[in-house]
Each structure stands twice: as structure tokens, then as C-alpha cells.
Amino acid sequence: MRYGGGLFLCCVGATIALGALLGGNAIAPLLLGGFIVGTISIFAVRTIVAKRYGRPSQRQVQLMIVAIALELTGFIALSWLTSNGALPRDPQFIWTSVLVIVAVHFVLMTWSFGAWILYLALAILAWVGFAMAQNLGLGAVLVGDGLMKLGFGAIMAAPLYVTQNPSHGIH
């Protein structure tokens, strides 16, 4: 699951960073596009990954579903609490909260995607803490987050980029 997940992270990370750099309302449609292209990428490499590395276990799939369900629950709770005035409606607060929810869901995905997703979760939480301590603007926070997802995603997907032919040296 790690390899397709890495491609997904690359797509999402690139669109978060680009959307933040473009500013305004650019992030929402770009992020949606990143989710769509990332999901297509997962299905596009599924057969290649299964041939090279085997299929994910039923437990890995179940844990991924639980992690996504809990993430969605967190988003629904955040939406409900901000719309009812229990939490601030400030974009900086909302996006920071979203990043924390995503990072926690990455921790839960460790058993499905391996150690690199845990390292990404910890990096995001550290980045959010640093950004809050330094009072960084939302654009900088999102660019940093997007670049981390892009970088960690590339590492996770890296085995897809190398040849399986031992005569080429990298395998």
C-alpha cells in the first residue's frame, strides 16, 4: 500500500503547495484535483505493485479504512464545532486543525503504509508546532506541509521508479 499511497501524497502535496503559492481560493480546486489524480494513480499502479510486492493484507486494508473513517469524523466534528461557534472560524485555525487531524490519521495508517507515513505524521506535527511558535502565516504553513507530503510521498513511492533488472544496478 505504501507505493500507491506515496503517489497519492505526491499529488496532494504538490497541489497544497501550489494552491498556497497561488493564494486566494486556488487551494480548494487544486486540492480536489490532487485527490482525484492521486486516487487514479493508486489504481493505475495497483497491478504493478501487486506483481512486484504482493497484495495488501486484509488487516492492512481494514486499518486504512478505520484511519480514514476517524479522519472524516474529525473533519465533521471540526466543521460542526466551527459552524456552531464553539471553535474559531479563522482560516489559520481551521487549516492548522486539519493538518493535525491528517497527521493523527497518518499515525493510524502506519500499519498499512509503513514507517515513512509515521515519520511524515511526526514531521507535520513538528511543523505545525514550529509554525504556531513562530506565528507563520497560513501560506507558509501550507507550502511547508505540501512540500513535506511531496517529499515523503516520493520516498514512499521510490521503489516504483527503479528497475527490477539487476543489471541496471538499482533494484
Image (tube, rainbow, N blue to C red):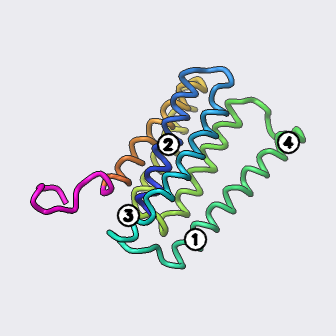
The numbered mark, 3 or 2, whose residue comes first in the sequence reads 2
The secondary element bearing badge 3 is classed as: helix
Q: Nearer the observer, disc 3 or disc 4?
A: 3
The numbered mark, 1 or 3, whose residue comes first in the sequence reads 3
The numbered mark, 3 or 4, whose residue comes first in the sequence reads 3
| Disc on res. 63 | 1
Q: Residue furthest bottom?
A: 58
Amino acid at pointer 2: Cys
| Disc on res. 11 | 2
Amino acid at pointer 4: Ala
Q: Which residue is at 68% across, 61% downward?
A: 70
The secondary element bearing badge 4 is classed as: loop
Position of 47 compared to 69: left or right?
Answer: left
Q: Which residues are magenta?
A: 159-171
Q: Counting other residues with Cα less than 10 Å from the Cα at mark 4, is it few (<14), some (14-19), or many (20 or more)?
A: few
Tag 4 residue: 86
Q: Overall secondary structure of the magenta stretch?
A: loop
